[in-house]
Image (tube, rainbow, N blue to C red):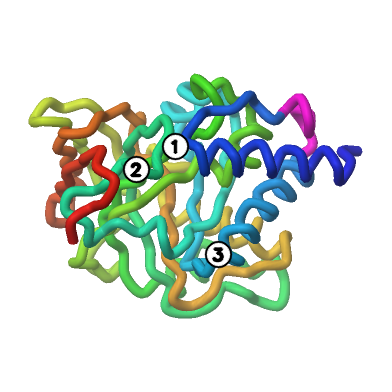
Amino acid sequence: MTTQDSISAAVDRLAQAQETRVPCAAVRDLIGTDDLPAAYAVQQGLVQRRLVDGVTVVGRKIGATSEAVQRQLGVDQPDFGYLLSDMDVSDQHPISMRTLVQPRVEAEVAFVLGSDIDPATEDEITLQLVREAVDVALPALEIVDSRIADWDIGFTDTVADNASSGLYVVGREGRKLDQLEPRDVTMSLTINGAERSTGTGAACLGDPLEALRWLAVQARRFGDPLRAGHLILSGALGPFVPFAAGDRVEASISGFEALSVEFEEGSEARR
């Protein structure tokens, strides 16, 4: 079993990397490669530090849902992390990279929940139940990031690092699920006009709603069920790609308006 001292040391290491924007060594030397409870305990420690600073939890993100991203990360299963209020840069033009360390970008379908997903038993968390809990679906760009040097991560490393989260952007125009079937969408992501990533809804655990169902089960097991109003980033539809300050990124997901953003290195973003 991983000791509390090792968990605290992992929290300190990742927090310092975030604060300084200097990548750190992987934390698997502290928590091992298979101790998922310890990895999620580190994640919780990082989130709790952020909450003390005044940010709030606004939802969750699901990571490593597509085979393409699993190959990129060297993992074989999905994970989840928390979305915090200061990660939302949907209204920043351009988006400042001042908090990022080694960012990549991916396109996905997001869901806003209209009701809690917290039934009496886990077996009741069905695909139909999560579908009924969704208010609207939105196009999203997730700016994933790693505080660990050179993205040299194992599964416990990415879990501990809040599922390699960074920032996110969601579109303004949502779609009800009677207007759109998430598993049938197609995606193209371009950087400065050049196509860099493609994929489909079916690449996300077979269906972004299946990813949401998986998350709802995990959240309930961890004692923190999904709640009405939460935003859920359901996972990448294709490979993530690197970008740099000055780049323009556009995601075209069928059924939604295209989502375009620009990035800058500056210390403050213009709003």
The residue range painted magenta reads 28-35
User: With 48 as the anchor, is 23 left or right in this view?
Assistant: left
Rounded to the nearest whole Å, what is the CA distance between mark 2 and mark 3? 18 Å
Query: Which residue position is annotated with label 2?
Result: 98
Query: Which residue position is annotated with label 1?
Result: 145
Q: Residues within 10 Å of mark 2 (few under 14, many from 20)?
A: few
User: With 92 as the anchor, is 227 left or right in this view?
Assistant: right
Residue 164, compared with residue 173, is above or below; it is above
Which quadrant: the C terminus? bottom left
Residue type at mark 2: give it.
Arg
Residue type at mark 3: give it.
Asp
Residue 179, compared with residue 197, is above or below; it is below
| Marks 1,2: beta carbons within 8 A | no
Residue type at mark 1: give it.
Asp
Q: Residue at x 55, y 43 (%)?
A: 163
Residue 95 lies, in percent from the top left, at 24, 48
| Marks 2,3: beta carbons within 8 A | no
* Residue 225 falls in image quadrant: bottom right
Q: Residue at x 48, y 58 (%)?
A: 83
User: With 94 as the anchor, is 140 left or right in this view?
Assistant: right
Rounded to the nearest whole Å, what is the CA distance between mark 1 and mark 3? 20 Å
Disc number placed over residue 130 in the picture, else none: none
